[in-house]
Amino acid sequence: EAAELTERATELIADSPVEAEELLVQARRLAPDDPQIVRLLTAATRRAEAKRTVERARTFWEAGERERAARELARANVNDALTDDAQAQLATWEQTLIQESSSADEADARRLYGLGVLLGVSSEGLRTLRERLGTQLAARATSLRDDGMPATAALVELEARRVGAAVE
């Protein structure tokens, strides 16, 4: 019976790690010294915990705790690589950040860029967020210069250049 449970769990481990974990716990009770069951149980437990971690991250995101969600999502890995669920969630959140940045003011653009860095979004996504922040900073520098505040404008221009914006 342990062999049958192990075989079923092996088929489920990638797609349904929680269910595989439960089957392997049962198999281990039947054959506590079987090294294959122990190895598979360890793998299933890691995958199941990564799946639960993605769910916790989603909960934090939906509650508006995006930084906490980003930190939680980073822990959804197996063998030092994000799981497929975590990668899919990261891609969804990256698109959300990019969409929000299209109409963001400077403060929001700064927050979105920082969140993109924390999440580890793709280089393309990060470049888009950085460019949009740079555009906001360049506009603020121009406004400050026009308002007769050249020193403050120069500081904002430096920051705009640092993020790669073209400043006149």
Image (cartoon, rainbow, N blue to C red):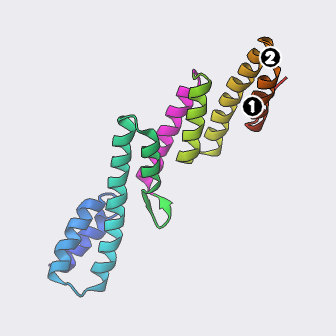
Q: Position of residue 21 (x, y in %)?
A: 25, 66
Q: Are marks 2 and 1 in contact (CB under 8 Å)?
A: no
Near-viewer residue (97 or 3): 97
Whether residue 89 is visible to the viewer of this picture, yes or no, is no
Mark 2 to mark 1: distance in Å?
Answer: 14 Å
Which residue was labeled with disc 2?
Answer: 145
- Image x and y of residue 25, in percent: 20, 72
Q: Residue furthest top?
A: 147
Which residues fall within the magenta stretch? 83-103
- Mark 2 nearby-residue class (10 Å; few <14, some 14–19, many ≥20): some
Q: Is residue 162 left or right of residue 42?
A: right
Residue drawn at x 47%, y 42% as measured from the top left: 67
Of tags 2 and 1, which is closer to the observer?
Answer: 2
Quarter of the figure that contains the C terminus: top right
Tell me the tag on residue 99. none
Please tell me which residue lies in front, 158 or 148.
148
Element under label 1?
helix
Q: Which residue is mark 1?
A: 160
Identify which amino acid the numbered label 1 is placed on. Ala
Residue at horizontal 25 percent and vertical 73 percent from the top: 7
Q: In this orientation, does residue 132 appear? A: yes
* Residue 114 position in % (x across, y down): 58, 39
Is residue 90 highlighted in magenta? yes
Mark with earlier residue (2, 1): 2
State whether the magenta stretch is mostly helix, strand or loop: helix
Residue 30 is drawn in which quadrant?
A: bottom left
The image quadrant of residue 24 is bottom left
Quadrant location of the N terminus?
A: bottom left
**Residue type at mark 2?**
Arg
Say which quarter of the image contains residue 148. Answer: top right
Horizontal and vertical percent for residue 155?
77, 30
